[in-house]
Amino acid sequence: MPQTQGNPVAAGFVAFGAGLLVASLVLPSEPELRLAGALREQAQPRQDELKEAGRQVVDEVTSTAREGAEQVKQRASVAAGTVQEDVRSWAHEVTDQARS
């Protein structure tokens, strides 16, 4: 390995890569498979709890967003009504001033 000579970081990367290659070629043993299955079974309830918690958060956020949108809609409607009243009032004033 002339390119890695004197470069311990490069030698470490080469050794790590070789280890990954060998590890990917070796099949898992029966105890490893049993352990993985047991861990998967233990994780399933937690996964279900997290999914449900996520659904609840989405529902709450959706509800809050709907309420906020409804409030904005109501306030916009009130503001539009106020503007219409002001325009009518100003139109009457302009008409009265024009007649005078």
Image: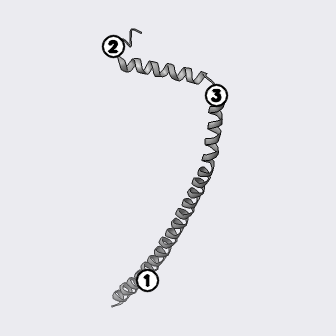
The amino acid pointed to by label 3 is Ser
**Picture coordinates of residue 82 (x, y %)?**
43, 80
Spatial CA span between label 2 and label 1: 85 Å
Label 2 sits on residue: 6
Query: Which is nearer the eye, 64 or 52?
Result: 52
49 sits left or right of 75 in the view: right
Q: Residue drawn at (56%, 23%), measured in percent from left and top? A: 23
Q: Nearer the viewer, mark 2 or mark 3?
A: 3
Secondary structure, mark 3, is loop
Label 3 sits on residue: 29
**Picture coordinates of residue 22 (x, y %)?**
56, 20
Question: Which corner quadrant holds the C terminus?
Answer: bottom left
Circle 1 crowding by C-alpha within 10 Å: few under 14, some 14–19, many from 20: few
Spatial CA span between label 3 and label 1: 81 Å
Q: Residue drawn at (44%, 77%), measured in percent from left and top? A: 79
Mark 2 or mark 1, which has the lower sequence index? 2
Circle 2 crowding by C-alpha within 10 Å: few under 14, some 14–19, many from 20: few
Question: Which corner quadrant holds the N terminus?
Answer: top left
Label 1 sits on residue: 85
Spatial CA span between label 2 and label 3: 38 Å
Q: Residue drawn at (61%, 46%), measured in percent from left and top? A: 42
Find out whether the residues at labels 2 and 1 contact each other: C-beta distance under 8 Å.
Answer: no
Q: Residue drawn at (64%, 41%), measured in percent from left and top? A: 38
**Picture coordinates of residue 21 (x, y %)?**
54, 21
Residue at the far bottom: name it. 100
The amino acid pointed to by label 2 is Gly
**Picture coordinates of residue 28 (x, y %)?**
63, 28
